[in-house]
Structure formats: structure tokens, C-alpha cells
Amino acid sequence: MNPSSTPPDAGSANPQKSRTGLTRIAHACGHSLAGLRAGWGETAFRQEALAALVLIPAAFWLGRDWIEVALLAGSVMLLMTVELLNTAIESVVDRIGPEWHALSKRAKDIGSAAVLLMLLLTAGIWLAAIWSRLPS
């Protein structure tokens, strides 16, 4: 094998790659919790997380079967996920540099649009569920 084609030692660049089993899972959970803490620093994510404290239990009350509960609760969780991804995009763009650039603006706008679409979907699911429970 050509030395230039051999993959670099994964352990030297990223210690996470050399971990296995429960150690890898424990470290991955730590990174996930750090991401949630970082997300909590964002106002939009904090608002969505606080709304989820009400909406997810409400999904079990409002949903008539497990599919409705999954759609209601899942849409809230997916909204929070998209918000975290948008925050990640914004962080990466900001790391590149503070100066204005058309591609930076485009990336941030697309991330924001993804959050808007998910918010509309979540609202639509919840409104449809509430509408179906109203007396005719």
C-alpha cells in the first residue's frame, strides 16, 4: 500500500475515535449534554424547550392513539432539533469570521427558513389535533 494512501491514525487526531464500548457511549453522552447546554444559551431554543415542557405532556392528553401522540410530541422534538442544527450552522459561520459575506448570510437564512418550516409544520399538526377534538 502506498504510504500516502494510508489513513491517518484516528487516535492521534481525535481521541473519541479510539474509544470503544461504554467509554465511547459515556463520552458521546457528555458531548450531547454539552450541546444541549450550549443550545440553552440561545433564546429561541430555550423558549422551545420550555414550551416542550407543556406540549409533550399535553400530547399524551390530546392524542387519541399512539400515532397522534407520536406526531404531536415528535413534532415538538423535531422543532427543537432543527433549532439546534440552525444554531450549529450559525456558530460555524460565525467562527469563519465576523465580516459580512453573501454565502454566510445565505447559510444563516436557509437555517432560519428550516426552523420556520418546522415551526409551521408543528403548529399545523397541533392545530389539526385540536380541531379534531372540537365538538361538531
Image: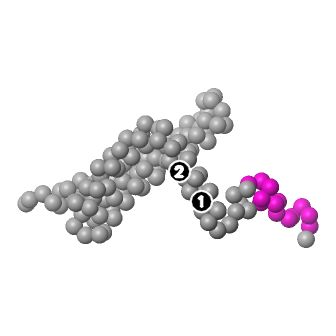
Name the residue located 43 percent from the left edge and 47 percent from the top edge.
115
Nearer to us: label 2 or label 1? 1
- Give the x, y percent position of residue 34: 55, 47
Name the residue located 77 percent from the left edge and 60 percent from the top edge.
10
Q: 100 and 39: which one is in front?
A: 39
Which quadrant is the N terminus positioned in?
bottom right
Q: Which quarter of the figure has residue 24?
A: bottom right
Q: Please indicate whether residue 26 sits to the left or right of residue 115 in the image.
A: right
Q: Which residues are magenta?
A: 2-14
Residue extending farthest to the top is 99
Q: Which quarter of the figure has residue 72?
A: bottom left
Q: Please indicate whether residue 65 sits to the left or right of residue 38 in the image.
A: left
Q: Residues within 10 Å of mark 1 (few under 14, many from 20)?
A: few
Q: Which quarter of the figure has residue 98?
A: top right
- Give the x, y percent position of residue 102: 59, 35
How far is the residue under mark 2 from the one under mark 1?
11 Å
Residue 47 magenta-highlighted: no
| Whether residue 88 is visible | yes
Residue extending farthest to the right is 2
Residue type at the position of mark 2: Leu
Name the residue located 36 percent from the left edge and 54 percent from the top edge.
76
Residue type at the position of mark 1: Ala
Q: Which residue is mark 2?
A: 33
Q: Please indicate whether residue 124 sits to the left or right of residue 77 in the image.
A: left
Q: Residues within 10 Å of mark 2 (few under 14, many from 20)?
A: few
Residue extending farthest to the left is 136
Q: 131 and 55: which one is in front?
A: 55
Q: Please indicate whether residue 64 sits to the left or right of residue 8 in the image.
A: left
Residue 11 magenta-highlighted: yes
Name the residue located 54 percent from the left edge and 47 percent from the top edge.
35
Q: Which residue is mark 1?
A: 26
| Whether residue 103 is visible | no
